[in-house]
Image: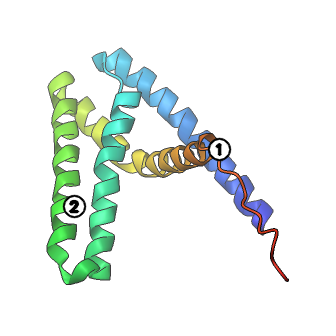
Amino acid sequence: MFILTIIGLLITAVAVYLFVGWFNDYSYRKGEYRFFSIEHTFAYVASYFPIFLGCSMIKSDWEHDPLNGIIIMVLGIIILIFTVINNFKNTNRSLAIKGTIAQLIFYIPICVITVSMFYVALSFFSETKPVYNINNKD
């Protein structure tokens, strides 16, 4: 079952990659604007991460004060709103609606993968070494 899960994830990743490439070409032909770029990825990571973090803080009643989670969640929503406004400023309305819906759906897995890759790279480049206890009696 684990192998089937890995195969399913790889097929899904390839399908998302192909759709993103096709949609970027389509949106560039129609409105000379690319909805999936590095800048948009950073903006959506910077918005989705606080939204999910704030939601989990509210659910876990962190520090017995849900206001902390609400404030963090609102900051993520503000970043998300500015990104959507940027889409509508740079292209026509119908393409902006299609592109924004595609971004809102497809940037969730892209953000999860991006944050995961960041943590893997951070752990790889931090060059942590295992610590051995020589005087252990076990």
- Residue 55 screen position, x and y as percent: 28, 69
Q: Residue furthest front?
A: 135
Local crowd size for mark 2, using a 10 Å CA cut-off: few (<14), some (14–19), many (≥20): many
Please identify the quarter of the rendering in which residue 93 is found: top left
Residue named by callout 1: 127
- Tell me whether circle 1 and circle 2 mark residues in contact (CB < 8 Å): no
Residue pictured at 61% horizontal, 40% vertical? 125
Q: Nearer the viewer, residue 73 or 35?
A: 73
* Label located before the other in sequence (1 or 2): 2
Residue named by callout 2: 73
Figure quadrant of the N terminus? bottom right
The amino acid type of the residue labelled 1 equals Glu
Which mark is on residue 16? Answer: none
Answer left or right for 118 relative to 108: right
Q: Residue furthest right?
A: 138
- Residue 2 screen position, x and y as percent: 76, 66
